[in-house]
Amino acid sequence: MFNGLIREIAQVVSYHNNILRLKAQYKPSLGDSIAVNGACLSVTKIHHDGFEVELSHESRLHIAVQNLKENVHIEPALRFGDRIDGHLMQGHIDFIGILEKIHKDENGVDFFISLPKDAMKFVASKGSIGIDGVSLTVNEVFENQIRLTIIPITFRETLFKEYKIGRKINIETDLLARYIYAQLQGIKNKELSWNEIEKISYLY
């Protein structure tokens, strides 16, 4: 699990034969889970100046691999007892969004990101979302687009300041929203008893 707070911006040394080598100050152990632009990957080799992770076929199908160049966000997995300042994230990329518009506001920067139609049921105004591994709040929801406001410290300490219109973005929708939707789909055509309703409420 992760909480969407970027530990470091790592430098991409190479990406070849599904192996991504990163230069970073953070020193993981072999087998550790690291979120790279929000995607949970396992450390397969340690170098004196960084580490390597391997991307499975499944991972490559669901993430924006074209962004595995120059610099990437990294976040190590949470340890038991760690403080959670963002929101709980699994490092499982659900969708690829596209940055459609950037608008500088009084004390922040608005990102307008279009999402696939299937993603919209998992987003809500003031709900949580993961954007390339960064925990953010959805400020506004449109028919097929969301608006996020990036505060100055987040804009400064992430790669967001380098993003251009048209960039593909790894999206992880809210964990609870996905689970609740799955539960509701399973009981869609079923009449619920009060005991079943109480059980579902207890889970969340």
Image (spheres, rainbow, N blue to C red):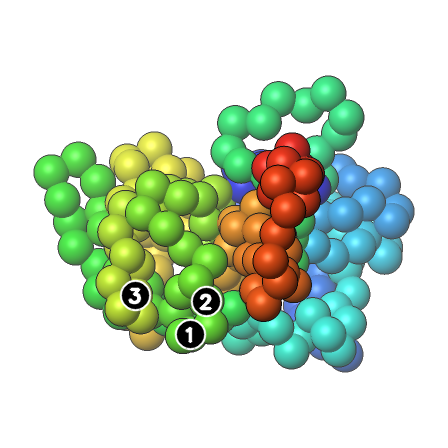
**What is the three-letter code of the residue carrying label 2?**
Ala
Mark 1 neighbour density, 10 Å: few (under 14) some (14–19) many (20 or more): few
**What is the three-letter code of the residue carrying label 3?**
Gln
Q: Which residue is mark 2?
A: 119
- Alpha-carbon distance for marks 3 and 2? 10 Å
Question: Could you tell me which residue is drawn at 69 percent across and 70 percent down?
Answer: 59
Question: Could you tell me which residue is drawn at 27 percent across and 68 percent down?
Answer: 143
Q: Which residue is mark 3?
A: 145
- Is residue 182 visible from the viewing direction of this image? no
- Alpha-carbon distance for marks 1 and 2? 5 Å
Q: Which residue is mark 1?
A: 116
Q: Earlier in the sequence, mark 1 or mark 3?
A: 1
Determine whether label 1 and label 2 are within 8 Å by CB.
yes
Helix, strand or loop at disc 1? loop
**What is the three-letter code of the residue carrying label 1?**
Pro
User: Is residue 196 depicted above or below 153 in this figure?
Assistant: below
Helix, strand or loop at disc 2? helix
What percent of the width, then of the height, locates residue 67?
51, 68
Q: Which mark is residue 106?
A: none
Image quadrant occupied by the N terminus = top right
- Alpha-carbon distance for marks 1 and 3? 9 Å
Question: Could you tell me which residue is drawn at 62 percent across and 22 percent down?
Answer: 83
What percent of the width, then of the height, locates residue 127?
40, 44
Q: Earlier in the sequence, mark 3 or mark 2?
A: 2
